[in-house]
Each structure stands twice: as C-alpha cells, then as structure tokens.
Amino acid sequence: MTDTAMEAGAVGTTEPLLSVEDLHVSFHRGSQTVQAVAGITFTLQQGETLGLVGESGCGKSTTGRAIIQVERATSGKIRFGDTELTALNRGDLRTLRTQVQMIFQDPISSLNPRRRVNDIVAEPLNIWKIGTKEERRESANAMLDQVGIDPYLLGGRRPREFSGGQCQRISIARALVLKPKLLVCDEIVSALDVSVQAQILNLLEDLKQEYNLTVLFIAHDLAVVKNVSDRVAVMYLGRLCEIAPSDVLYEAPAHHYTAALLASAVEPDPETARSSAALLGEPPSPINPPSGCRFRTRCPRAEPRCAEEVPEMRQIASGHQVACHFPIGN
Amino acid sequence: MNDPTLLEVEELHVSFATSRGSVQAVQGVSLSLDQGKTLGIVGESGSGKTVLSRAIMGLLPRSSTTQTGSVRYNGTEILNAPNDVLRKLWSTHIAMVFQDPMTSLNPVQRIGNQITEPLKIHLKLSKVEAKETALSLLMQVGIPSPVERYEAYPFQLSGGMRQRVMIAIALACAPRLLMADEPTTGLDVTVQAQILDLLGQLQHDRDMAMILVTHDLGVVATRTDEIIVMYAGNVVERAPTNVLFKSMAMPYTEALLKSTPRLANPSHTRLTAIEGRPPDLLHPPAGCPFSPRCPYAQEKCHREKPPLVEAAPGHSYACWFPLTAARSEEPEEVTA
C-alpha cells in the first residue's frame, strides 16, 4: 500500500495527528433529538488526506464542524496531537484554532464583503500579532501570490469583484496564512464549474505538499473525493459505513451503501454501463433512525439480524474497515 | 431523419441590455430536435445554455432582451410570439423542469393545487377529474403515498421529492417537448440517478422529446442522442453522443472532459485544469472565444472566429485546428 498512514504506522512511534473516538453530536428540536453524528471513530495521520463522503444529512459537515469545535460534541473524544479538544476552555481553544483551520462551501459568502482581500488574508496574522505590520503584509501578499491572486494588482479589491473560484483561492490563502497543521475542507469545490474545480483541486494538492498539511476533505462527489484522498470514509445517517484506502474502496467496496453510491455515480463516458438508480427511496429521518444497522431499510442484503444488532466497525483487510454483518465479497 | 422535426432553432441571438452595455449571451445558435429524441446542452456557468433554453421557451423578459433569429415549433414561429400564443403552447406542447426544486414551487400552495392548476386551465378538466389525474401523475413520478402528498406543502418534502413534483407538473398536460434545465443539480447522487431514470422512463413511455441542459458531461453521456457543447454564447461542437465522446474535435470539449475527475482514475491523478476564465460577453473577442485559453491556439484563432461547420454527417464543430486532424499528425505542430 502506498498509504501514508501505514507508512507512518510502520515507523512505529507516530501518533495520529487527529483521533476522533465515538463522537456524538445531537441537536434538540423541541422535544425531539436529532442525532446528526451517532458514534463515529477514525484517525488522521500527519500528512494524510481523509475523504469523508455521504449524502446530504448524513452528518459529514457536522463532523467537520465538531472537529474545529464550532459545534460542540455531545459525547466522545477528539484528540489533536496531545490535546483533548472537547475539554478545552475558550481561551485555549482560540489558541488552538491557529493550528486547525476550515474552508467552507460558499466561497463568496465566507469572505467579508466590505474588506479588501489583502486585509482578509492578513487578519489572522493581525489577530495573533505575528511579526511587524510590514512582515504581516508581506506574508499575506506572499500567500495570495501562492494561491494565484496577484496581491499588487488585485489585493486592494473586495470579494465581490472576484469570481467564485478566485474567492475560494482567497479563502484558502486566509486558512493557510497561519500555517495550520490540519485543514478541514467542507465541500470546497461543489459550487464551482468543473474547469475551476480542477484548478482548485490541483492547488490544494500543491499546497498540501508544500506545507505538509493534514486534510479532512468533506464532499459528496465521489470522483472528487477519490482524486484528493489517501483514504476515504463513507458516512450514512450519522454513522460510518466503511473506511479504506481510496483505490481499494472504489475498486472493491465492502459495504452495500458504498456499492450503491458508486453505482449511482454518473461518468462522462457512454461506454461505461449506464448508471441507474441503485437505491430506492431516501434516507430515513435522523430523528427516528432505524434500529440495528441504519442502512438496513434500503439495503438489498438486509436480514433480521441487521435490525437487531448494530454492526460494529471491523477490519476485513489491512486498513479496510467496514460496519456490516454481511459485507460484499465475504 | 425519418422523424419529423419538432423544434428548429436558427441563428438565434440573444442580448441583454445592461448599464455597462449589451451582453451577448447567445450568439447565433442553430439546432433541431426530432420527436422523441433527447438533446443534451452542455456548458459551464455563463456559457449561455440557460439563456438559450429560456429563449426557446419564450421566458425571457421582452423589455431588456433583444432576440433575433428563429425558433420554430412544429413549423410555427414562436420567437417573440405574443404571450397568449405562448400560453397555449406551454404545458400542452412544451413544458419545463427548472433547476431549483426548492424555489420553483409555490411555497404557500398545496402540492395538489399546483398539479391540478394546468389540468383545469389547459385541459378544462373538472375538479374531480383533475384530482384523479394528479394522483396518477404523482404515482407515475414515484411519490410514495400520493394521497397524503397531494395535501402536503412543498416544505414538507425533500429536494428529490420536490423535483418529482416539478416533473409531475411539467408532464401534467402531456407535452411533446420537455425542457429540463439542470434537473438534478443540487440533488444527491442516488437521488440524481433516480430522477434521471424517471425522466428517461417517462420520455420513453410518452415518446416525448427532451432537452437536457447541464454542466455535467456525466449526466448527458448515457442519456442523450445528441450533444451540443456551448462556450461563451456559441455552439462550439455538436455531435451524436457516441461520436462526441469517441472523436471530439473541439479543444474546449476535450478540456472540459479532462478537467472532470473520474472514478476510473487512481487517486491523486493530476487534473488538467483549464487556466484562465471565459471571455467577457460585453466585449466578445474577435477570434475564437476559446482561443485565449486553448493550448492549441495559433495566430489565426485569435484573429478570426471559426464558423460551425459540419465536418462529418451530424458532427459539426467551430475550430480552425480540430483535434482529430491534429491527432493524426503531430499535435500542436499543425500549421494552417
């Protein structure tokens, strides 16, 4: 395997940069409780990109937001290096956010429309008073230059003068200017045209190499996730179904939901077998999720056991984990 | 070409008057569609695909747009036709499914009312007949427990369900031509597959023609007979679907395909991005609109706009140095 995680593991002593253990996030709506994230566990090694895929409402964004502590976990542990994030007070959390940054889906609304882009990018440096004023300006300009925005020509403009793709570049510059270790990307290319999407994905790949970034890449597009990720985790209705190295997951999915997602994806090639709906209906409500395996109501392979017993995440091959009583290929 | 032509568009130009000048959103588009066939219109944001589809439908505001050329439906000219003529066509002959199912339905009317409205107005059905037809339509578009949904408001339905309702409304009066503008954008992959299957099925059952407007080459690859690729208000390539994917001639089509991440490729495959951005349609360039971003562009491309020519039966493209010719010799080395 070319998996960075495993190489890191082979060295021996490397602790994961991020480890999420039995994370639960619930929201209350009147007397009802929505379990957006219902017990998920995964780790991220230094320098690795983990893709998190799933359909709307599966809890993938909530997971990302819980990691940067925008959403507070109901229970569970989130360890970043040696620090337990769920136990931090406000001040320590603020300090820690210099190392954990997030990029959001809508590039235009995530930038302050009234500020000039070079101020937007310099803001994190100003807040932490890193270097002198000149140095800050210089690093902000260098960062803008690196994401492909000419700081001298365009730095004085405001976000509305840029296209969606350029705004996403500016968001990336703002997120990276403090040289964070972990970057959470939530659907960062889903609002962009394919040609621009390719530019942003290539840029992310380059910056990842340069800054040795660890990335949690949340998206719904299977092909995009495969392109950027070392490993991929598939989520359904608040739980993880499967985690595997990208190439393995896409070639030999073990969970029936992963297989259905792959079968539904459209490919720009008339020669490929025409994709057709592999799943009927829509996911059930997270307010009242099915007992046992949450996917069982739509699963082609479901048996009585699936309703009674929650399938635990188990290892079926090196680095390949699945939460299913009857995985494909077994 | 045994089927009679249902829709014929010739040299359609659409421009918008803005405070900064006139935006030439569609610059001379011609197309034709036979009964029962599916045409895919592919392009990125700003390529003019949505404006084109709305111009065909007659939905653009008259006051701020200039539309010239010809749009003939069944032989009748409908471009710039008066509203009462268009109103007789809409729904019974041409219907549209819009992109955003969240905002295209009336939020304060029950689903049932929204489906029965065209039935009562156009087909003059009685209340009871209209309700029966509406329930059968809801069933046809795969909505579970249609009797309950009939009384529901849009906010009580998911995105996929709302898109099904939109399709039911569009199909209510059995149109001959369905215009679907990004019908699955914003929906999840499994739901997208369901909706595309549904559209294909209904189209087949009713022998209806369809125009599928999308930014996603994947959506049109297996579900259309012919594809038109648009760039900056122009048709840059037009071909039967299989031909287009097998021997695309226009560098833009190739660039679009190469920049799309593919499931078949291993992870971390470097994508071929198209650098730069589409031209400003306030001042369209003199030459080929794609020439500033084209890897094969030569001097002639910047100077003269290539016409859309039919190079092989059914396959037209607007390019001075098409890829098929370049491939047989040395790419990038071709001279005029």
Image (cartoon, coloured by chain):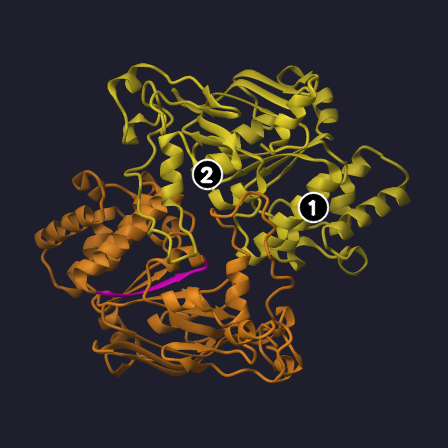
Chain colours: A yellow, B orange
Label 2, secondary structure: give it.
helix
Q: For the point 50% across and 66% down, which residue is it?
A: B253
Disc ID at residue A206: 1
Counting from the top left corner in percent of width and height, residue B213 is at 39, 63
User: Is residue B210 on the magenta stretch?
Assistant: yes
Report the residue that reaches farthest toward the front.
Answer: B329
Q: For the point 77% across and 52% down, which residue is it?
A: A145
In front of the other: label 2 or label 1? 2
Instruction: Indicate the chain on which mark 2 is placed.
Output: A
Q: In the rendered image, is residue B169 in sight?
A: yes
Instruction: Indicate the chain on which mark 1 is placed.
Output: A
Instruction: Report how far apart the C-alphas of labels 2 and 1 lie in the structure.
Output: 24 Å
**Three-letter amino acid code at disc 1?**
Asp
User: Is residue A309 on the magenta stretch?
Assistant: no
Q: State left or right for residue A266 relative to residue B114.
A: right
Quarter of the picture containing the N terminus of chain A is top right
Residues tagged by mark 2 and mark 1 found on one chain of the structure: yes
In the rendered image, the vertical position of residue A279 relative to residue A197, given as above or below? above
Q: In the rendered image, is residue B50 in sight?
A: no
In the rendered image, the vertical position of residue B275 relative to residue A173, given as above or below? below
**Three-letter amino acid code at disc 2?**
Tyr
- For label 2, the residue is A250
Counting from the top left corner in percent of width and height, residue A49 is at 61, 35
Q: For the point 56% across and 78% down, which residue is it?
A: B321
Does label 2 or label 1 sit earlier along the sequence?
1
Label 1, secondary structure: give it.
helix
Q: Main secondary structure of the magenta part?
A: strand
Q: Which residues are magenta?
A: B208-215
In the rendered image, the vertical position of residue A20 relative to residue B36, given as above or below? above
